[in-house]
Amino acid sequence: MFFATALFTSIGSTESVALIQTVVIGVINVLATLIAIGLVDRAGRRPLLFAGGLLMGCAQFALGIALRFLYSTPPLEAAPQQLLSKTQVSGVLAIILIFVIGFALSWGPLGWLLPSEVQPIETRAAGMGLSTALNLAMTFAIAQAFLTMLCHLKWGVFVFFGVCIVAMTVFVFLLVPETKGVLLEDMAALWESHPVWKRVVGKEARNGGGGGIGGGKGDVGGEKGAAAPRVGKLG
């Protein structure tokens, strides 16, 4: 989405039309994000991630295949500098909009929500900070590498990202639990009940965390208990 204007210009749109198409993408992105805000607590996190992964993956593969055949069919094969027709550009725009809708409904907003939910209270600040740093670092890396990848891989760059999306969706299916309606205090128990993560997060972690919480409550109780005699002595 960072290079939408350059992409549309390279395949046949004029600069003014490419700017309008980029604005359309931005508007659809905002609208789909607002829809995601209304759906996230109704549908749950995992269903949205699966639906978004399906839409984004199909869009990436469709765009890669479409560009592959469009640019391998005469006269484009003999004159690669020739641009696509308006109808073909409209088709490319439609595919990109499908990708944007899928992203804005799922991985876009949930990429910020889920990291704040899956962390236990004890590690939430550090975990969210690390997640944000990695998110921004990967965004920077992709933004820097995309044009170079597009020049070398051409249509294959979209197939590459399609494979990445498939891997992301499989990761969610296997390793990301549903956090809908789960309290932060119960997050450790959620990880312990997960079929994969329960092998890593054992009862020792829960007992240690529970002991810490219990100890905190005991300390608070002790402070209140210690305050009463002091009041009594003052009296």
Image: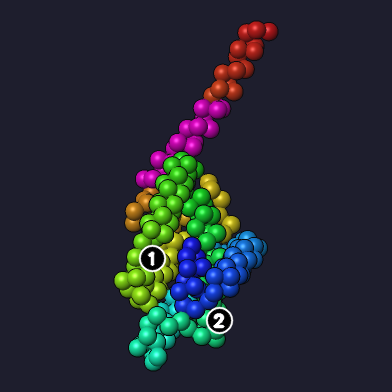
Q: Residues within 10 Å of mark 1 (few under 14, many from 20)?
A: some
Residue 6 horizontal side relative to residue 195, left or right:
right
User: Up-down: is 185 above or below 24?
Assistant: above
213 falls in the magenta region: yes
Residue 224 at x, y percent in the picture: 59, 23
**Residue 81 in view in this figure:** yes
119 falls in the magenta region: no
Read off the magenta span. 204-221
Q: Amino acid at mark 2?
A: Ser
Q: Earlier in the sequence, mark 2 or mark 1?
A: 2
User: Up-down: is 187 above or below 20?
Assistant: above
Q: Residue at x 34, y 70 (%)?
A: 151
Residue 227 at x, y percent in the picture: 60, 18
The local secondary structure at tag 2 comes to helix
Residue 170 at x, y percent in the picture: 40, 69
**Residue 36 in view in this figure:** no
